[in-house]
Image (cartoon, coloured by chain):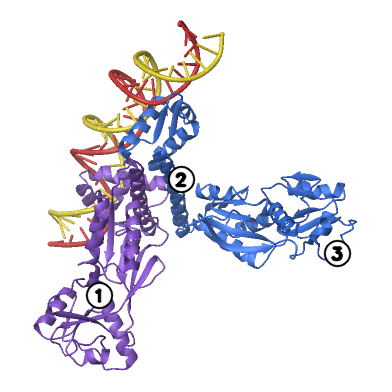
Chain colours: A purple, B blue, C red, D yellow
Amino acid sequence: MRHLQDFAFIEAVMRAGSIRKAAEDMNITASALNRRINRFEEEFGYEIFERLPRGVRLNPAGELMLHHIRSQRSDFARLQSQVADLSGVRRGHVSIACSQALLPYFLPDQIARYRDDHRGVTFSVNARDRLEVERELSTFSSDIALVFEPRHVVDFEVVLSVTQPVFGIMREDHPLASESELRLRDCLHHPYVLPGAAFAVRVLLETAVKRTNFERLTPIAESESFDFMRHYVLQENAISFQFPIGLNPKGTPGLVALPLSPRDVEPGNLLLGQLRGRTLPVASARFVQQLAQALVAQNF
Amino acid sequence: MRHLQDFAFIEAVMRAGSIRKAAEDMNITASALNRRINRFEEEFGYEIFERLPRGVRLNPAGELMLHHIRSQRSDFARLQSQVADLSGVRRGHVSIACSQALLPYFLPDQIARYRDDHRGVTFSVNARDRLEVERELSTFSSDIALVFEPRHVVDFEVVLSVTQPVFGIMREDHPLASESELRLRDCLHHPYVLPGAAFAVRVLLETAVKRTNFERLTPIAESESFDFMRHYVLQENAISFQFPIGLNPKGTPGLVALPLSPRDVEPGNLLLGQLRGRTLPVASARFVQQLAQALVAQNF
DNA sequence: CTCAACCGGTGCAAATTTTGCACCGCTTTT
DNA sequence: AAAAGCGGTGCAAAATTTGCACCGGTTGAG
């Protein structure tokens, strides 16, 4: 669209850090781009870029403008989606930032279901830190967040919250494999692996250990990958910890998953959310609705 | 701004109902405007106007576009206000839709106080129906609403709610003028004037009368103007009804204002609100804050 | 039934705007 | 001291937008 052109150039300049580089990226002369930027600033009434000896950089007004540009783009996408909707085309794009646990089973299943009804809708799915989620939403990089224990801040609007206990994963021949519920003290007497500090499971376990005045956590291995940890316990007879939503609903041969007693470890909060105050595009809004239904029905 | 130009033309065409008339309004040739509209529709991917034999009209997609345009304008105004804010200029515009009662004393006082600190901020103030308020907000015609008993709907976000009893206004020599509190039954035994059905005072009185199973309300005069009614009781010795926020805080010579007993008539709810989910421009947001403070402190 | 009055749309040339090129002055880097 | 990069500018070419004249179609009054 014509009226978003200047915005594209501004973003390019911001990314490239200099007008000349941005001009190359956009296949345009530096002088033309320079004039566009200058004219834009003149019409807007304020400078957007700080002129440095080695290029340009957004000033505070420019930061506000950048946010405005992103918000406007997303609004426009929503408008197109709505219009497509009423002309019966039903298309759009949904971008999701989520915890790693959602990647293997839950989201693929939910997305497939959604696309059964709406073939025109495309998805992007990205695993993100509990801490990264807010920025992800507020820069409009993602429409929807589905995360365990995100840092709770003002810009994050919780649509739905469900709890899941932490599960211990072990081999069938593990001494604790026949229990119906795991006690934290018992688990810590055996070798175990843990995710890094950025993960909700780790946060919950650390909190539990602090509360019960045990010794510090001493995992035999630490990893960012729940997949790795789950497979590791098949090698060395250890325990790994994970939320059940990330487990194969049909179970894994040779592995047992048992919940940790809620008396020892708080269950994790899985929050479905979006940027506060934002009206999502039709496709995203409907997908949020579907996710909410699936989560309350525990359909996984 | 350049990128809002097309939007202005689209709005003009919508208002005029035909491209040719709009072209005249905008001091441009019909052919040029026609081409702008066509190009816009082509770039957007969908037609915005329905072509009729006698002109054009927005189709459903166009309605969505119109809303988008208005929202975008208002977003842009907010952006400018924010940028002005951080360059220390402090300017902006605040538009308010309110009940008639706020016009004579409360809002003039509040606006004057605000402008003492911020000379650059301008205001528009318009009296609106309880029913018109929501549309006023959702079309971005007003930023803020301050209304008695508005129809309560989803798009109206209540920032603050305060109650005021209905007062009876009469001459000093009226038989009831020496009471400390008015009973509805007593009032109705004397001649009285009432506002139209669109006014909160009337709604509250009608409700009260229905509840107590009195005869129907039979005013000797009906008017849209509380000013008229207040002056009328000086001529014929009647009672008029009004919220105290609309009365001169210093009193009016020859007139007495007495509250109706809360046992008979529910007090009116004065709601301060805005469009749900909207982020107001800085100037408007601060004025809302000031209004809220004044209202809770009953500074009037 | 006819015809004037409007309507949206289009071909073409004029007017306006945007772009590319060459170049300036400046700062940093080598 | 020279080279490399940067933003900014004058000027002519290129591209876009506009105005004018006109077309085909519909409406409504005489």
Q: CA distance from mark 3 to mark 1?
A: 72 Å
Residue type highlighted by circle 3? Glu
> Can you tell which of label 3 and label 1 is closer to the viewer?
1
Q: Nearer the viewer, residue B147 or B119?
A: B147
- Residues marked 2 and 1 touching at CB (< 8 Å): no
Query: Label 1: chain?
Result: A
Q: Of B32 and A274, which appears nearest the observer?
A: A274
Quarter holding residue A39: top left
Q: Do the residues marked 3 and 1 share a common chain?
A: no
x then y, percent, for residue A109: 23, 62
Label 2 sits on a secondary structure element that is helix
Residue pointed to by mark 1: A244
Number of residues whose C-alpha sits closer than 10 Å to that of mark 1, classed few (under 14), some (14–19) or many (20 or more): many
Q: Residue at x 20, y 93 (%)?
A: A189
**Closer to the camera in the image, B269 or A86:** A86
Q: In the image, residue B152 lies at what x, y percent? A: 57, 56
The spot of residue A270 in percent (x, y) is 32, 71
Q: Could you tell me which quadrant the C terminus of chain B lies in?
A: bottom right
Camera-nearest label, 3 or 2: 3
Sequence order check, earlier mark of 3 and 2: 2
State left or right for residue B271 relative to residue A82.
right
Q: Is residue A66 left or right of residue A215?
A: right
Which residue corresponds to mark 3? Answer: B179
For marks 3 and 2, give the CA distance: 52 Å
The residue closer to the viewer here, B17 or A158, is A158
The amino acid pointed to by label 1 is Pro
Please tell me whether residue B261 is drawn above or below residue B126 in the rendered image. below
